[in-house]
Image (cartoon, rainbow, N blue to C red):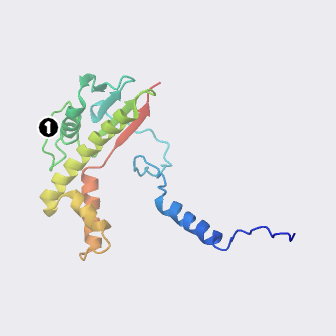
Amino acid sequence: MAKRAAPEVNAGSMADIAFLLLIFFLVTTTIETDSGINRKLPPMEESEEDVIIKEKNIFTVIINKHDQLLVEDEVMELKDLRAAAIEFLDNGGDGSCSYCNGSKDPKSSDNPDKAIISLANDRETSYESYISVQNELVAAYNVLRDKRSQALHGKPFSELEANYNDVNWPGNKELLKKQIDQIKVDYPQKLSEVIQK
């Protein structure tokens, strides 16, 4: 009786199948991107001279471990935080701010340039609460910058920044950059963050 040869598997298309599987996984896989808060840190100052800041120019916001908000030693709801921050920043207490629309309360901040928001959170504060408070405080600056930009240039600040970042925007980018920088000088974002022990 003749010996039969063992059947062979045609492996010629295995490389094609592997290549197709690789492409399938590359196309369908999502890659996690880092999330967080986009912040530009201030440059390190070489001066060792202590800066004296008047207490009335500091707007204190504290989040405790139960996500409760304490603003200027009073309990506050998150929905009221933005308005309180705007009122503090736009106060113009010393009369040196010609564009401030605040109440000019001498017990509150002197000038937007001198006003600092101090945010303190507990180590056990939830991430969602921390981000919500951050959003409200940054939104307060954005509201004031939008108003200032609208008054000076007839456009909100966010539109100026969007035009500046648009590579196809046909206008004068140098002039636009000066306008953006001036509004940032008028309402500088001074947000100090500390962690309570």
**Residue 63 percent location from the top left of the image:** 35, 28
Q: Is residue 145 left or right of residue 123?
A: left
Q: Quarter-wise, where is residue 158 in the image?
A: bottom left
Residue 112 visible in the displayed image: no
Residues 45 and 140: in front is 140
Which residue has dot 1 on it? 104
Q: Is residue 101 left or right of residue 131?
A: left
**Residue 53 percent location from the top left of the image:** 34, 36
**At 18% across and 47% down in the image, what residue appears?**
97
Q: Residue furthest right?
A: 1
Helix, strand, or loop for circle 1?
loop
Residues 170 and 93: in front is 170
Residues 17 and 42: in front is 17
Q: Residue furthest bottom?
A: 170
Q: Is residue 16 left or right of residue 168?
A: right
Type of amino acid under label 1: Lys
**At 59% across and 68% down in the image, what residue appears?**
17
